[in-house]
Every structure is written in C-alpha cells, then in structure tokens.
Image (tube, coloured by chain):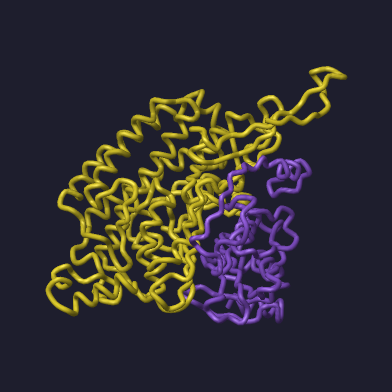
Chain colours: A yellow, B purple
C-alpha cells in the first residue's frame, strides 16, 4: 500500500495534513467476482479515482481458435461467459453458419431458443443472486441457486455437462433432446417463477435494499451507448434494445414476449430488468415447447455435418466423410463476417475471418462485459466502496468473456 | 447506400465499398478514418451511434499488399443496421488516428488492438496494454507470434502510472 499526501480542507481543521489511501480491490476477493482488480484511491471511504486492470483470466482464446478447426472453437466458447455457455455456443455457430450460407432446421432453431433462454435464466439467477448477496441479503441466494441447480440438472441430462456444455454444432446440435428433457423443462417452468417471486418479494420494497441500489451507479442512455453498453444494463437505462427482437434470429419474433426496460439506469433497475427478463424467457420457453417441431436437428449437408455413426462404421463413403470433417474440418468459404446474438450480458459478437480452409484465420470475440467494465471507474468515482461492490454485481462482469 | 453517402460527403476518404454477408464494408483512407467514423455517427439519417468493436487482422498469410487491416464495427439504432469500416495499414507503420474522445468505448478497444496486434492509435492518451502483462514482449495475435512461445512474467503492476494519469484527468472516464 502506498499513500499520497494532500492538503486537508474543511472539517478537519486548518493546518492538518491528511493522506489519501490507495487500495487494491481484488483480484482475489469474493466481492470482485473472481479475477477483477481495481486500484482505488480513497478519501476516507469515498473513491477519488479507480483504475481497473484486466487480463488475469486472459487465456488467448483468439490465438487458440486459430490453431484448430472451426468446430474446435465451440468448446472454447463455453469458457467465455461460463454462466451461460449455451448462449455462447449458439452465438458462435450462428456466425459460422452465416459464412457457410446454411440455414439450420426448424427443430434446431426451436431447441436453440429453449436452451438459450434456459441459459439466460441461469445467468440472470447467478447475477441477481450474487449481486444481492454482495449487498448483504443472503437469503435470496438459496432461492436463486437452488433453482439454477435444477436447470443444470436438466442441461446435464441433455449434453452431459453442467457448465461447459459444448452442445451446438455448426449446422445443428450435438444430439437431439433426451427423452426426459421436455418434462424436465415443464417442471422448471413451474419452479422458476416461484423462486424468482420469492427473491423479488424479499427485495422489491425493502428499505435497506432500496437505499443500497436506487440511484447507485446511474447512467443515462446516451452515455451507456457511448460506452458501447448492450444487454440488460443498457435496457435498464430505458432503451428497449434487444437483438432477439431487432434481428429476430432463430425465430424469436414468432414468439409473444416483451422487452423489460428500466428507467434510471441504476443498480436497482439493472437487477430488476434481469428479474423481469427471467419471466419473459419463461414465456418464450413455454411457447417454444408447445410448438416444438419434429424432424432432424442437423441439416442434411455432408460438407458440414458428421455422418451417422452407422455409416461411418458401415461404408467407406461415410468413413471418408467423417475423416475429412474431423481432420480437415468444415471448409468455410474465404471471407469475413461479424455476427452477433443477444447473450445474457448483451451483444456477443464473433468476427470471423476465413482464408478458405478448415481452420479459422481469425476469430475475435466482441464481449459485452468489456464494454461494461470499461465504464466501471466512471460509475464508482465519488461513491463509497460499498457502492462499488453493489455496482459491480449489477454489471455482472464475467471474467471469462472479459479477458478471453 | 451507406458507402455512397459517405463518399458523397467525404470524397476519396472512402476508397471502396462492398457488402459482405449483408453488412456494408467501407474501405477507407487510414489517415481519414476518424472523419468517416464521425460522419457515420453524426449524420442523422445514418446515426451509427454505437462503436461495438475494434480489431485488426494480420494478413501476412493471405498475401495482402499491406499487412494489417483494422476493422471498426458500428451499429445504428435508427436503421437497425451494421457497418464495418476497414483501413489497410503497412507493416512498417501501422498507425491510425484514434477515435478516443468520439466514443468512450474506443479507449479500451483501441488499447486491446494495440496490445494484440501492435496497431498504434495516434492521439490516444493512454495507449497501454489491456489484456497482456505490461512487460509482455511482442503482439500475440500477429501471425508470426508463435503460440507455443511462453513468457514468464510475475512482476505485479502497481498501476501508479495509471493513477497519475487519472489524477491528471487523462483517462476516458473523466
């Protein structure tokens, strides 16, 4: 710790000398959500300056992506926002599918909507749960995390993993839904609203909660746009911008749902936008389940999708096709594309460059957390340390996608 | 359409326009990239108010006449449309004027592009590494940086130089 001297003013009396204090928040502290480090200069408990340092979880996603086939990037995307891996899986394969010029099947689109929204619910449950814990309200944590655990059970039965799902494939999905999936999700549709309502009723009009969140870390729409904010944090400022509505990818516009927006862009609004988005996601999932189309989940294109195992072991064409797709990878036509989806924290973009081979020439991730965290010093300057903790939780910075 | 509007206003600052996978791409003169960005942002009919990402591509294995291509991804709320502004830069002098001050998001995005590719954004008041360690040598996303090359860097950054800049009001959040 180092100190810097400044002249004392006002209440402490003339001639007294006080020093501001420089303190590290993080990187290894539970309230800093993993690996975030912020150097703050303090006057008492008031933050004068804040310097974030990121990169503690930088694993070279983009460099690693260049070294394998296009398909091998999918497991890497699990490790971006690890709270909602399925949404990252979906975002990446959508970008590659666009470059290939293929359209996935109706059933695949509907399944992607269902798992994507379940994933968004999980992410919001974590964000809201930990945020309110950071503020000091522990009880809500069990409501959100128990529910999240039940969703994980369904996801685990679907693809074998809880967090690192790796469930989508270019041109489809790793496998069709398991037999118990639909019944499991129907059960979740009943359980999740109960838990979310419990949390909502604990905090909505709670005096302490209001004091800790209303007006804390407020930002206007124009400023949020200048920072490149997207997702729930931008919507909390009152702007109904949601790529699911605006792009309508995967048929999101076929479902009946609304975009919740806040008013003041403060911590309270950010928490409640997420809570209301959970309800909207549930509406989407319910409709998607009701009209889940039949048919295959993968497109019928041997250039993109692996042949069925029976053919791989049964005839030479199937074996060769499998070998080529595994060893050389899917051949993506030369060119560039930037494609974005609405992930749990906002616009998740993939800028892919292909040289016409089976390996990506470049994959750049546009992560929503980077834009949010860049604005963090602006939000906490002049506020107390305890506000800084409340604010960082409401931004839901995920180091995995921040540092890549 | 976007490219034509920009060309009508800014002349040869826009060298070439094309559409790729439904996104309009504007190849611009590197020295005038901020003019084009400002026009795209401020023209009320275009209103590309969001700078979502800045990145570069190292074209050394693609046989490009110039090694680097920097891409700016913009989004317009009004038009619900994206545009990509690109500029080619030679290996000897990979420099571009900074969009710092035009968008707050430009600060970190340009720092990251500098960090990963060694693109220099002139006029950026705090062009330091973002993701990699401060003593890291080289730019890891350049194609000639070997993925297996390891660098042992354990010295923590006390960030005091950054704090001095913050006190002087040089950082984007002020």
The residue that appears at 20% across and 45% down in the rendered structure is: A184
Question: Which of the two residues, A216 or A180, is positioned nearer the viewer here?
Answer: A180
Question: Which x, y percent locates residue A26?
Answer: 56, 35
**Number of marks in the image?**
0
Observer able to see residue A240: no
In the rendered view of the protein, which quadrant contains the N terminus of chain A? top right
Question: Which of the two residues, B158 or A198, is positioned nearer the viewer here?
Answer: B158
The residue that appears at 21% across and 59% down in the rendered structure is: A176
Question: Which x, y percent locates residue A332?
Answer: 39, 75
Question: Which of the two residues, A112 or A220, is positioned nearer the viewer here?
Answer: A112
Q: Is residue A382 left or right of residue A286?
A: right
Question: Which x, y percent locates residue A122?
Answer: 36, 43
Observer able to see residue A298: yes
Q: Is residue B18 above or below residue A96?
A: below
The residue that appears at 70% across and 68% down in the rendered structure is: B95
Residue A76 is drawn in which quadrant?
Answer: bottom left
Residue A308 is drawn in which quadrant?
Answer: bottom left
Q: Is residue B19 left or right of residue A325?
A: right
The residue that appears at 64% across and 41% down in the rendered structure is: A377
Q: Is residue A336 above or below residue A344?
A: below
Question: Which of the two residues, A241 or A97, is positioned nearer the viewer here?
Answer: A97
- What residue occupies the far right of the structure in this picture? A15
Question: Which x, y percent locates residue B156?
Answer: 62, 42
């Amino acid at each position: 710790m180092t100190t810097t001297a400044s002249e004392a003013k006002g209440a402490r009396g003339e001639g007294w000398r006080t020093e501001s204090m420089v303190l590290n928040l993080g990187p290894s502290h539970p309230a800093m959500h993993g690996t975030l480090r912020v150097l703050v200069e303090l006057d008492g408990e008031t933050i004068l300056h804040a310097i974030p340092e990121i990169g503690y979880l930088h694993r070279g996603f983009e460099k690693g992506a260049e070294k394998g086939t296009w398909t091998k990037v999918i497991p890497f995307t699990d490790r971006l926002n690890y709270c909602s891996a399925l949404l990252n899986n979906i975002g990446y394969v959508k970008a590659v599918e666009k470059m290939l010029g293929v359209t996935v099947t109706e059933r695949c689109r509907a399944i992607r909507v269902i798992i994507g929204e379940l994933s968004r619910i999980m992410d919001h449950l974590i964000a809201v749960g930990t945020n309110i814990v950071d503020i000091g309200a522990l009880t809500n944590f069990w409501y959100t995390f128990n529910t999240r655990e039940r969703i994980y059970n369904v996801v685990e039965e679907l693809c074998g993993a809880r967090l690192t799902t790796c469930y989508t494939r270019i041109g489809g999905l790793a496998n069709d839904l398991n037999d118990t999936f639909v019944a499991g999700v129907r059960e979740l549709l009943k359980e999740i609203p109960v838990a979310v309502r419990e949390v909502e009723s604990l905090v909505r009009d709670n005096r302490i909660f209001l004091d800790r969140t209303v007006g804390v870390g407020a930002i206007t729409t124009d400023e949020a746009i200048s920072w490149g904010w997207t997702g729930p944090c931008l919507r909390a400022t009152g702007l109904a911008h949601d790529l699911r509505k605006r792009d309508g990818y995967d048929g999101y516009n076929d479902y009946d749902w609304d975009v919740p927006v806040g008013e003041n862009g403060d911590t309270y609004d950010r928490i409640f936008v997420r809570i209301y988005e959970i309800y909207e996601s549930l509406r989407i999932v319910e409709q998607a389940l009701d009209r889940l189309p039949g048919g295959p989940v993968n497109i019928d294109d041997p250039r993109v999708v692996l042949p069925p195992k029976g053919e791989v072991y049964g005839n030479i064409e199937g074996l060769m096709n499998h070998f080529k797709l595994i060893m050389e990878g899917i051949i993506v036509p030369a060119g560039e594309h930037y494609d974005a989806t609405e992930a749990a924290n906002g616009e998740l973009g993939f800028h892919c460059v292909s040289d016409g081979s089976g390996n990506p020439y470049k994959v750049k991730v546009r992560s929503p957390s980077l834009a949010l965290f860049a604005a963090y010093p602006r939000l906490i300057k002049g506020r107390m340390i305890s506000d800084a903790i409340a604010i960082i939780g409401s931004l839901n910075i995920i180091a995995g996608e921040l540092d890549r | 359409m976007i490219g034509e509007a920009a060309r009508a206003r800014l002349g040869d600052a826009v060298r070439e326009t094309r559409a790729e996978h439904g996104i309009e791409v504007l190849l611009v003169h590197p020295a005038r990239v901020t003019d084009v960005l400002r026009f795209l942002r401020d023209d009320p009919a275009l209103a590309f108010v969001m700078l979502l990402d800045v990145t570069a591509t190292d074209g050394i294995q693609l046989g490009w006449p110039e090694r680097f291509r920097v891409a700016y991804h913009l989004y317009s709320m009004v038009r619900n449309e994206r545009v990509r502004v690109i500029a080619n830069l030679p290996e000897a002098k990979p420099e571009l004027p900074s969009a710092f001050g035009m968008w707050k998001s430009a600060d970190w995005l340009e720092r990251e592009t500098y960090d990963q590719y060694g693109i220099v954004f002139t006029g950026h008041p705090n062009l330091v590494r973002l993701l990699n360690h401060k003593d890291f040598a080289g730019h890891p996303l350049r194609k000639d940086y070997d993925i297996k090359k390891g660098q042992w860097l354990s010295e923590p950054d006390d960030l005091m130089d950054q704090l001095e800049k913050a006190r002087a009001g040089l950082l984007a959040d002020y």
